[in-house]
Image: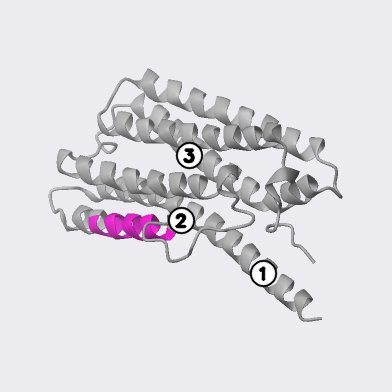
């Protein structure tokens, strides 16, 4: 008895579909890079138009991903091996969609805030490098999630090891550690008014949440693989 998430022979998946899956994951990587660029633009107080352009780029990525997901879902016969794979990927793909929409919401917020000169909306110079490092770890968590499940790695047959030194959870833990350090700096700075501290804390927490979402998707996939392996083991004992 085979499961939806694993034991999919490579020959079953056409090269065309494998290429489409790689293209889908490439689009996620591009969206993550756009998010990283938008964080930098916001921190460096670049012109308002910069963040709006990046918000537009991410919107285009989302449209492309929606079209590709629909192609997967409508192009695979439900009872085929490919159909089983697409079904198994449905929840994680939806999770990635929510993650990218959260990125887009944040970038749009950067763009809107860039259009105002409120003294309560700025990042002190001494925090810029810390927030950039946080964004690096958050985006690394998403990138590792994507690379772990490339079709070329046969993730549905050989899920990446949970003991991997720098898996999604490793980067998520790094992001949590950095966000806590930044928050402590913010609230320990007596030179900042509360009206400045609260938006800064919200910025840090929202960036960090992207890594939390990536870890949630990764854990869900691992749970599916463990359940599938347990089912196969039970089937082989009969």
Q: Residue 88, percent across and down?
A: 71, 53
Q: Element type at marker 3?
A: helix
Would you say 185 lies left or right of 237 here?
A: left
- At x 31%, y 20%, the residue is 47
- At x 58%, y 36%, the residue is 22
Would you say 90 lies left or right of 153 here?
A: right
Q: CA distance from mark 2 to mark 3?
A: 13 Å
Q: Residues within 10 Å of mark 1 (few under 14, many from 20)?
A: some
How many numbered tags mark residues here? 3
Q: Element type at marker 2?
A: helix
Q: Main secondary structure of the magenta part?
A: helix
Q: CA distance from mark 1 to mark 2?
A: 26 Å
Which tag, 3 or 1, sits closer to the chain's start? 3
Q: Which residue is mark 1?
A: 229
Which tag, 2 or 3, sits closer to the chain's start? 3
Front label number (3 vs 1): 1
- At x 27%, y 34%, the residue is 43
Q: Nearer the viewer, residue 69 or 121?
A: 69
Q: Residue furthest left?
A: 191
Q: CA distance from mark 3 to mark 1?
A: 34 Å
Q: Which residue is mark 2?
A: 212
Please give the range of residues in magenta.
169-181
Q: Residue 75, percent across and down?
A: 80, 35
Tell me if residue 90 comes above or below residue 114 in the rendering.
below
Residue 179 magenta-highlighted: yes
Residue 151 falls in image quadrant: top right
- Quarter of the image for the C terminus: give it: bottom right
Q: Which residue is mark 3?
A: 103
Q: Nearer the viewer, residue 107 or 95?
A: 95
Q: Residue furthest bottom?
A: 237
């Amino acid at each position: 008895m085979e499961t939806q998430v694993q034991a999919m022979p490579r020959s079953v998946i056409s090269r065309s579909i494998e290429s489409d899956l790689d293209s889908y994951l490439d689009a996620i990587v591009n969206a993550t890079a756009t998010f990283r660029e938008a964080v930098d633009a916001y921190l460096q107080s670049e012109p308002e138009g910069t963040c709006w352009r990046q918000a537009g780029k991410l919107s285009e990525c989302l449209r492309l991903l929606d079209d590709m997901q629909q192609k997967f879902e409508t192009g695979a016969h439900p009872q085929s091996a490919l159909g089983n794979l697409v079904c198994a990927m449905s929840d994680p793909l939806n999770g990635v969609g929510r993650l990218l929409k959260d990125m887009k919401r944040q970038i749009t917020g950067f763009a809107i805030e860039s259009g105002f000169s409120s003294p309560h909306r700025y990042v002190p110079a001494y925090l810029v490098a810390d927030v950039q490092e946080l964004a690096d770890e958050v985006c690394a968590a998403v990138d590792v999630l994507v690379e772990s499940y490339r079709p070329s790695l046969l993730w549905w047959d050989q899920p990446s090891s949970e003991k991997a030194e720098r898996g999604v959870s490793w980067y998520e833990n790094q992001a949590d550690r950095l966000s806590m350090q930044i928050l402590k700096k913010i609230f320990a700075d007596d030179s900042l008014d509360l009206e400045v501290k609260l938006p800064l804390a919200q910025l840090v927490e929202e960036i960090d949440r992207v890594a939390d979402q990536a870890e949630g998707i990764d854990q869900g996939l691992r749970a599916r693989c463990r359940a599938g392996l347990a089912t196969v083991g039970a089937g082989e004992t009969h």
